[in-house]
Image (spheres, rainbow, N blue to C red):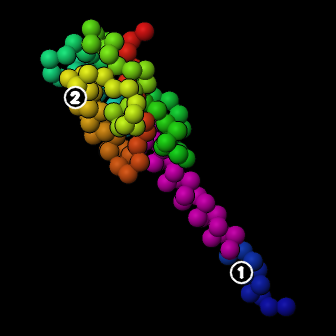
Amino acid sequence: MSPLIPYFVLSPIVAGGLVWWSLTRLGKKRNARAKGSLDAVVTRLRGQKAPGAVDLFVQDVSWSGETELSPQNCRIRVVMGGRDAAGIPPRFEVESAPGAPRPPADVLAALRVLDAQATEALKGGGWSWQRPTVSFEPAA
């Protein structure tokens, strides 16, 4: 029996352990960065007044979902207050389907600016090629 047999048996186990440890560490760092950028969106948008001649302000911002595996399951919920908030359909997304209900043009322009600010804050945390869903809602 060759004295090299233990090395042939142990080397794949050690290499697999090193790969697993590296990927776990990278995943934890990416997840922390993604959560940090979601928190940055919350702090950036909270209490902000929408630009333009509309009476809209951000009343509340929150995010929910899983950041690690699939960004599509992560949602950012922006609750809007003000007189013009009544024109916003429930769970409105700026990039919604063509047949979906839309708010008036000036309200839509203001929501597009807020959505662009949210996207800009997300890009710093690894959300450059995929991003969570940003939905706007009128205050209840």
Depth-wise, is mark 2 or mark 1 nearer the camera? 2
Q: Is 9 on the left-hand or right-hand side of 99?
A: right
Circle 1 is placed at which residue position?
7
Circle 2 is placed at which residue position?
109
Q: Main secondary structure of the magenta part?
A: helix
Q: Which image quadrant is residue 12 in?
A: bottom right
Compare residues 133 and 1 and report the one nearer the observer. 133
Compare residues 115 and 39 and report the one nearer the observer. 115
Where, quadrant-wise, is the N terminus in this rendering? bottom right
Q: Does the rendering let one see residue 93?
A: yes
Q: Does the rendering let one see residue 59?
A: no
Q: Which residues are magenta?
A: 12-35
> Image point 70% across, 69% down: which residue?
13
Where 47 falls versus 94 (above or below)?
above
Spot occupied by residue 24 in the image (x, y as percentages of width and height) = 56, 53
Where 99 falls versus 56 (above or below)?
below
Q: Residue furthest left?
A: 53
